[in-house]
């Protein structure tokens, strides 16, 4: 249906059901108006209160209809309210740019899943620095990135592995899981998802 709800109402009111027995015509107009009002209409309801969020040409909804005026440090709860992120909580995941770096700086981070991003396709990590709250940490390269973790025995770093080096393949969902002990990190699990 390409006509808008208002256009359909105009057709019903101005001539589609005129003449003849007025009682029947008025009843039919009322029924048709009720059907038109009940029918969802793409043009009339898009991005309107009590309507729906339309999807733009970019495949995304216009977030101005749902965004909080000051969204920094807030998230949208499942009850539809904006909630400030508390400093004491563990927000599970964090993405860190490691482009050209040999260490991962986690100062002030409390996430236990660290997604590693780089503008390069490969990176090598020797050390993890900073205070880490979780006792277990997942280091996951994003798709398209391969990260080699080097053992402390070959580079005087603080990552202790079961071998001298392990490469996690991001496009295969590879990761390294380490346990923290003081400022040292010990391999707990490694998935390379086979090259």
Image (cartoon, helix red, strand yellow):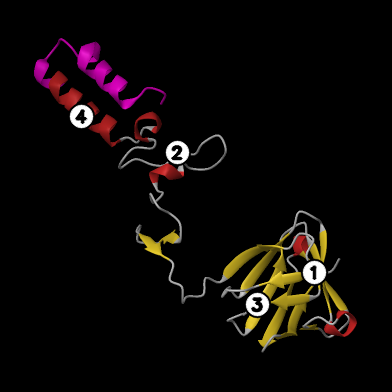
Cα–Cα span, label 4 and label 3: 69 Å
| Dots 1, 3 in contact, CB < 8 A | no
Residue depicted at x 83% and y 83%: 152
Q: Is 16 covered by the magenta stretch?
A: yes
Q: Position of residue 178 (x, y in %)?
A: 71, 82
Cα–Cα span, label 4 and label 2: 29 Å
Which label sits in the foreground, 4 or 1? 1
The mark nearer the N terminus, 2 or 3, is: 2
**Label of residue 102 in the image:** 1
Q: Which quarter of the figure has residue 3?
A: top left
With 38 as the anchor, is 58 left or right in this view? right
Judge by depth and name the residue closer to the eye, 178 or 78.
178
The mark nearer the N terminus, 4 or 1, is: 4
78 up-or-down from 36: above or below: below
- Magenta range is 1-24
Label 3 sits on residue: 130
**Label of residue 54 in the image:** 2
Q: Residues within 10 Å of mark 2 (few under 14, many from 20)?
A: some
Label 4 sits on residue: 31
The mark nearer the N terminus, 4 or 2, is: 4
Cα–Cα span, label 1 and label 3: 14 Å
Q: Residues within 10 Å of mark 4 (few under 14, many from 20)?
A: few
The mark nearer the N terminus, 2 or 1, is: 2
Q: Which quarter of the figure has residue 58?
A: top right
The mark nearer the N terminus, 4 or 3, is: 4
With 105 as the anchor, is 88 left or right in this view? left
Q: Position of residue 7 (x, y in %)?
A: 31, 20
Q: Position of residue 136 (x, y in %)?
A: 64, 82
């Amino acid at each position: 249906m390409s006509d808008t709800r208002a256009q359909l109402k105009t057709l019903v009111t101005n001539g589609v059901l005129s003449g003849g027995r007025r009682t029947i015509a008025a009843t039919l107009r009322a029924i048709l108006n009720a059907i038109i009002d009940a029918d969802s209409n793409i043009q009339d309801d898009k991005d309107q209160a009590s309507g729906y969020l339309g999807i733009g040409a970019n495949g995304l909804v216009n977030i101005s209809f749902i965004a909080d005026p000051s969204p920094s440090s807030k998230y949208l709860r499942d009850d539809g309210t904006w909630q400030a992120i508390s400093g004491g909580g563990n927000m599970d995941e964090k993405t860190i740019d490691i482009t050209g770096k040999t260490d991962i700086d986690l100062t002030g981070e409390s996430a236990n899943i660290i997604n590693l991003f780089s503008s390069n396709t490969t990176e090598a990590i020797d050390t993890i620095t900073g205070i880490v709250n979780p006792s277990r940490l997942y280091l996951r390269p994003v798709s398209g990135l391969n990260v080699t973790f080097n053992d402390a025995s070959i580079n005087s770093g603080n990552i202790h592995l079961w071998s001298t080096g392990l490469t996690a393949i991001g496009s295969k969902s590879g990761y390294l899981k380490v346990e923290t002990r003081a400022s040292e990190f010990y391999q707990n699990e490694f998935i390379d998802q086979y090259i």
